[in-house]
Amino acid sequence: MNRLATLALVLTLSLAGSAAAQDFPTRPITMIVPFAAGGPTDVLGRLMAQHMGNTLGQNIVVEDVTGAAGSLGVARVARAPGDGYTIGIGHWSTHVANGAVYNLPYDLLTDLEPIALLPSNPFLIVTGNAMPAKNLQELVAWLKANPSATIGTAGVGSGSHIAGVYFQTFAGTHLSYVPYRGTDPALIDLMAGRIDMMFDQVSEAIQKLQAGQIKAYAVTAKNRLPSLPDIPTVDEAGMPGLYINVWYGLWAPKHTPQDIIAKLNRAAVAAMADPTVQMRFDDLSLDMPPPDQQSPAALGALQKAEIEKWWPIIKAAGIKAE
Ligand code: MLT
């Protein structure tokens, strides 16, 4: 092909690309949620999907693709065509921690395009109501006296699992990990007394806690939450520095055209700016990222910085997929 013909081809392809982006979306979009229905990722995903779908004029259909601490769902997004019709919600553990725990069949940074940073929340250390311990120190003492104590997680390498292992390095306790496909089924077993404790994200635990169905011992944040003023921070409860913040994001497969990413980002930003969505975030105690952090670039930068911070911690703690 001579240079003129090549130039014409490139021009035609890029015009076709931007026309496709202009019309996007012309059919429903699929949002992959990598954990069980009813859990914190699923609840936030559905909230975003509904509002973003209204903005974009097409339904966003949520599909829960669970297993292997969310990595099966993320793999589905990484393998999908980069046309904007498959996107995925994930968080600190799926898009940071999993890379240190699994030999992933995709690269977290190069096989995915960031779309938008979403809200975040810390964990609560929770037990069922039958737990006799009155505070975190008593809980640690109880765990030491009960070496067969169980902790529910969303799978090896999930946020709830890594938080548990991190806790053990502070507490010097032994825990048996019970994996689920998300924290929602684990929470059901916690309330039924089938497991002893959990690290559960505030957005999921808050309603059960306010209804008196579970107990909480500490929040993995530097400051007490305005929504739960009676729950001490880990510093106050005697585990200084056990901070974990689970931030969420949206990603598309690599090669998704930048103007489609920009359209999806605008829809996500519009959802987060909507007062009714903000009220729901407040109920769930989810913390909104500041407007200048809601861009694809800000999500990409945060993900990279968190990989640099957490991979050495996770590897030093010896957390590995069995
Ligand atoms: C879930 O949605 O079940 C949780 O986000 C899983 C986790 O990270 O522990």
Image: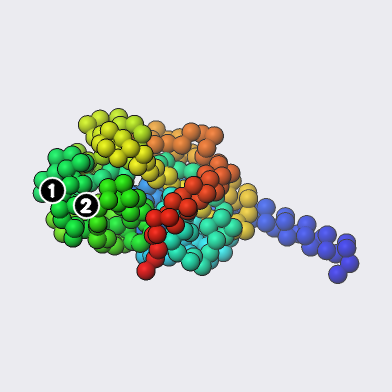
What kind of element bears circle 1? loop
Q: Which residue corresponds to the image point at 24% horizontal and 57% vertical from the top-left?
A: 175
Queried on whether the Cβ of the residue with tag 1 lies below 8 angstroms from ligand 1, the answer reads no
Q: What label sits on residue 6 in the rendered view?
A: none
Queried on whether the Cβ of the residue with tag 2 lies below 8 angstroms from ligand 1, the answer reads no
C-alpha span from label 1 to label 2: 9 Å
From the viewer's perspective, is 214 left or right of 275?
left
What is the x, y in percent for residue 59?
A: 44, 53
Mark closer to the chain start, 1 or 2: 1
Whether residue 242 can be seen here: yes
What is the x, y in percent for residue 274?
A: 43, 35
What is the x, y in percent for residue 86?
A: 50, 59
Q: Which residue corresponds to the image point at 85% horizontal and 64% vertical from the top-left?
A: 5
The tally of labels here is 2
Crowd tier of the residue under label 2, counting other residues whose Cα lies within 10 Å: few below 14, some 14–19, many 20 or above:
many
Circles 1 and 2: CB distance less than 8 Å?
yes
Whether residue 37 can be seen here: no
From the viewer's perspective, is 231 left or right of 25?
left
What is the x, y in percent for residue 234?
A: 30, 38
Q: Is residue 135 above or below residue 254?
A: above
137 or 223, nearer to the observer: 137
158 or 213, nearer to the observer: 158
Crowd tier of the residue under label 1, counting other residues whose Cα lies within 10 Å: few below 14, some 14–19, many 20 or above:
some
Quadrant containing the C terminus is: bottom left
Quadrant containing the N terminus is: bottom right
Q: Is residue 66 above or below residue 173?
A: below
Identify the residue position indicated by label 2 in the image. 197
Give the quarter of the image for residue 82.
Answer: bottom right
Amino acid, disc 1: Met
Q: What label sits on residue 131 in the rendered view?
A: 1
Q: Which residue corresponds to the image point at 73% horizontal and 60% vertical from the top-left?
A: 13
